[in-house]
Amino acid sequence: MKTLVDIDDDNLEAAKLALGTSTKVETVNRTLAEVAALAARRRDLARWIAEELPDARSNDVARAAWR
């Protein structure tokens, strides 16, 4: 799907450097994926801090995860 957007050139260049991408399309798509992944990690961390993931604090579960 093609979408026309106005992108700040300085932000695009900074993102290209940070991500190691070479094209606008690659940079925008990778940036969107990185932001979505970051949001998921933040959500999971907030749940862990709020102790909504009790199994994550279990030593038995942690040992099993590393097998």
Image (tube, rainbow, N blue to C red):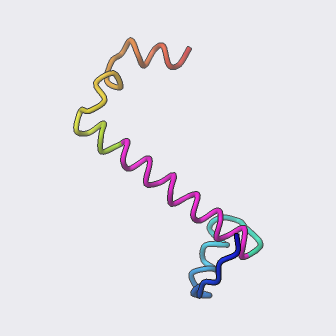
Left or right of 36 in this view: 19: right
**Is 11 situated above or below 30?**
below
Residue 54 placed where, x, y %?
28, 24
Q: Residue at x 43, y 54 (%)?
A: 39
Residue 16 placed where, x, y %?
67, 72
Q: Which residue is drawn at 60% across and 77% down?
A: 14
Q: Nearer the viewer, residue 4 or 22?
A: 4
Q: Quadrant of residue 6?
A: bottom right
Residue 35 placed where, x, y %?
51, 60
| Magenta span contains residue 3 | no
Left or right of 54 in this view: 4: right
| Residue bounds of the magenta highlight | 24-44
Q: In which quarter of the image is residue 19?
A: bottom right
Q: Which residue is drawn at 70% across and 69% down?
A: 1
The dominant secondary structure in magenta is helix
Left or right of 30 in this view: 67: left
